[in-house]
Image (spheres, grey):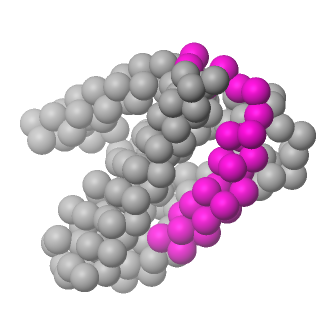
Amino acid sequence: MAGKTTCVSGVVEMLKEDHENVKRLFEEFEAADGQAQGAIAARAISELDIHAELEEKVIYPAIRNAIDDSDMMNEAVEEHHLVHVLIAELKKLKPKDEKFHAKFCVLTELVKHHIEEEEGEMLPEAERRDIDWEALEVAVAKRKDALIMKSAGKKKMRAKGTGKSSRRT
């Protein structure tokens, strides 16, 4: 049982660390101005892209199979959909655009609400369920590493000026 608790903690703690990181970036965005806001928003968007894919492709399917609450899971997926819509719109804007700040603030509020529900309802319920947490932790770590490498590659391409089409991902 100790191994199961450790693995549960590993997955849940990783999610909570990601949540804290993005909330910190949201605070930094509000405290910054101009060009700094654009760089902070770009980091937050990158973090959210990776985090959302981990949840959608690896974590949520495992939780959905273990809990009997399709309403909660469907709501989480719909919140992710809205996050993706806002991110896609933000990627088309420049930080100087008059709508950028407002759109990023809406993204911030949506993500904070999502985090509250996830940490307050979904994750505690999932922790009580018989999920293969060890296998899930391995899958999440492997996928996260791949996504981070992919993201780093896109950043290098943009820095070289060859990644123009990557804005549409």
Q: Which sits in the foreground, 99 or 110?
A: 110
The answer, for residue 81, to whether it is visible in the render is: no
The structure residue drawn at horizontal position 41% and vertical position 29%, both measured from the top left corner, is 144
Q: Say if the magenta span includes residue 45.
A: no
Q: At 25% from the left edge and 82% from the top edge, which residue is drawn?
A: 31
Residue ID at (33%, 75%): 27
Q: Nearer the viewer, residue 85 or 118?
A: 118
Residue 140 placed where, x, y %? 49, 27
Number of numbered discs visible in the structure rendering: 0
Which residue sits at x=54%, y=68%? 112
* Main secondary structure of the magenta stretch: helix
* Left or right of 130 on screen, residue 59: left
* Quadrant of the image containing the C terminus: top left
Is residue 152 shown to the viewer in this render? Answer: yes
Measured along the vertical axis of the image, is residue 35 above or below residue 114? below
* Left or right of residue 132: residue 35: left
State the image coordinates of residue 132 (x, y, percent, origin top left).
66, 20
Question: Magenta segment range?
Answer: 108-135
Q: Is residue 56 left or right of residue 25?
A: right
Q: Which percent across, then down, holds residue 156?
A: 16, 34
Residue placed most toward the observer, 43 or 23: 23
Camera-nearest residue between 118 and 40: 118
In magenta segment, residue 113: yes
